């Protein structure tokens, strides 16, 4: 693992899993996403991981128009690295999932490193009343959908986004096998180090929320990539902060945000993304770790710079 004295905080601002009925503080309109992202950057997030939403009903959207309604505003108001999702949601085609990234040509994109059943039905159990017709079906049928990421899909993203625009990737690894898939593409020369490996734990369908799995993932990544990778980790839901802390203790980086957890503590909804950023920042600083600035993150990850994007 390529270690740094400073920790990169990534904030995943809205995602495509949680729905408006689950929290009144989930940002869904362009104004809300922009304001929440800017506030998270001010709190210490060096990277902003972004999805788009339909502003009418909050459903996940692949639309370049919806992305462009907030991306330039965030860039103008913040120096943070903007990371555009290519994961979208399991209901989108690959061409739809790439629409925002192709329009934005950002410094960084997320890239899911394999298929998985992304079951988030449990998130709907807390909802007493659904605000929009699409939400209940979307959540309750997630156990019957596969987040499809074949090797053909992965190669297309690497070529059509990475090689075409000089965009680098947050390699989202939901299981140990995803590390080997990344190693396969690295051996073929389709991506180059340093690799930002984002270990994701606690999704039903991926690797479980046992902190020993974090050390295991780092051990396997060390064997495959040596010093050619930068590690980060998070866990979904109630395990969010403990897994971020474990990542930092191992010399890695962290990711928080309302995409990954709607809560700030047990039973208490977070009122903003910034609230989660401030909490993990306090934990990190109490551990004696410094927080990386956006430009320090750019240097560590070899990013092309904010002036080389298309928005």
Image (spheres, helix red, strand yellow):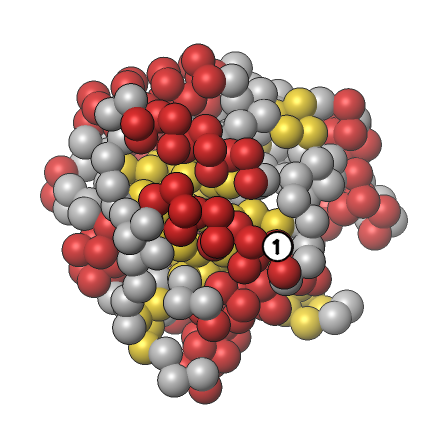
274 lies above or below 61: below
Q: Which residue lies furthest to the front in this view?
A: 223
Q: Is residue 106 left or right of residue 41?
A: left
Mark 1 crowdedness (10 Å alpha carbons): few <14, some 14-19, many ≥20: some
Q: Where is residue 135 in the image (x, y as percent from the top left)?
A: 73, 33
Whether 228 is drawn above or below 42: the answer is above
When asked about the image quadrant of residue 119, the answer is: top right
Q: Residue at x 61, y 50 (%)?
A: 201
Coordinates of residue 160 in the picture (x, y in percent)? 29, 18
- Which quadrant holds the N terminus? bottom left
| Residue 308 in the figure: left or right of residue 161 | left
Name the foreground residue: 241 vs 15. Answer: 241
Residue placed under numbered mark 1 in the picture: 213
Figure check: 181 above or below 174: above
Provide residue 187's location: percent of width, then percent of height: 30, 27
Splitting the image into 4 quarters, where does residue 266 fall?
Answer: bottom right
Q: Where is residue 144 drawn, in percent x and y?
A: 77, 23
Q: Is residue 31 something one can see in this rendering?
A: no
Q: Which is more toward the observer, 85 or 181?
A: 181
- Number of labels in the image equals 1
- Of the 4 image quadrants, the one containing the C terminus is top left
Q: Can residue 213 be seen in this view?
A: yes
- The residue under the point 47% across, 38% down is 179
Q: Residue at x 63, y 60 (%)?
A: 212
Indicate left or right for 103 with 134 as reference: left
Q: Could you say whether the residue bearing mark 1 is in a helix, strand or loop?
A: helix
Q: Which residue is drawn at 51% across and 40% down?
A: 173
């Amino acid at each position: 693992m390529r270690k740094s004295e400073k920790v990169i905080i990534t904030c995943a601002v809205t995602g495509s899993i949680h729905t408006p009925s689950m929290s009144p503080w989930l940002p869904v309109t362009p104004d809300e996403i922009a304001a929440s992202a800017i506030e998270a950057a001010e709190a210490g997030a060096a990277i902003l991981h972004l999805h788009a939403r339909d502003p009418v009903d909050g459903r996940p959207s692949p639309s370049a128009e919806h992305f462009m309604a907030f991306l330039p505003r965030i860039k103008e108001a913040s120096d943070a690295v903007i990371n555009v999702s290519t994961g979208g949601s399991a209901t989108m085609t690959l061409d739809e999932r790439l629409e925002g990234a192709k329009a934005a040509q950002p410094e960084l994109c997320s890239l899911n490193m394999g298929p998985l059943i992304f079951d988030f039905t449990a998130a709907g159990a807390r909802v007493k009343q659904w605000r929009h017709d699409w939400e209940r079906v979307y959540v309750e049928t997630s156990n019957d959908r596969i987040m499809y990421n074949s090797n053909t899909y992965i190669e297309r993203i690497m070529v059509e986004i990475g090689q075409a625009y000089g965009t680098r990737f947050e390699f989202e690894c939901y299981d140990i096998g995803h590390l080997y898939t990344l190693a396969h593409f690295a051996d073929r020369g389709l991506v180059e180090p340093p690799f930002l490996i984002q270990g994701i734990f606690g999704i039903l369908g991926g690797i479980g929320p046992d902190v020993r799995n974090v050390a295991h993932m780092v051990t396997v990544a060390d064997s495959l990539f040596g010093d050619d990778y930068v590690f980060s980790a998070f866990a979904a839901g109630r395990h969010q902060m403990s897994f971020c802390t474990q990542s930092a203790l191992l010399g890695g980086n962290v990711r928080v945000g309302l995409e990954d957890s709607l809560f700030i503590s047990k039973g208490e909804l977070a009122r903003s993304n910034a609230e989660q950023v401030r909490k993990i920042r306090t934990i990190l600083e109490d551990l004696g770790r410094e927080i990386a600035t956006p430009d320090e993150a750019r240097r560590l990850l070899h990013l092309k710079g904010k002036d080389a994007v298309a928005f």
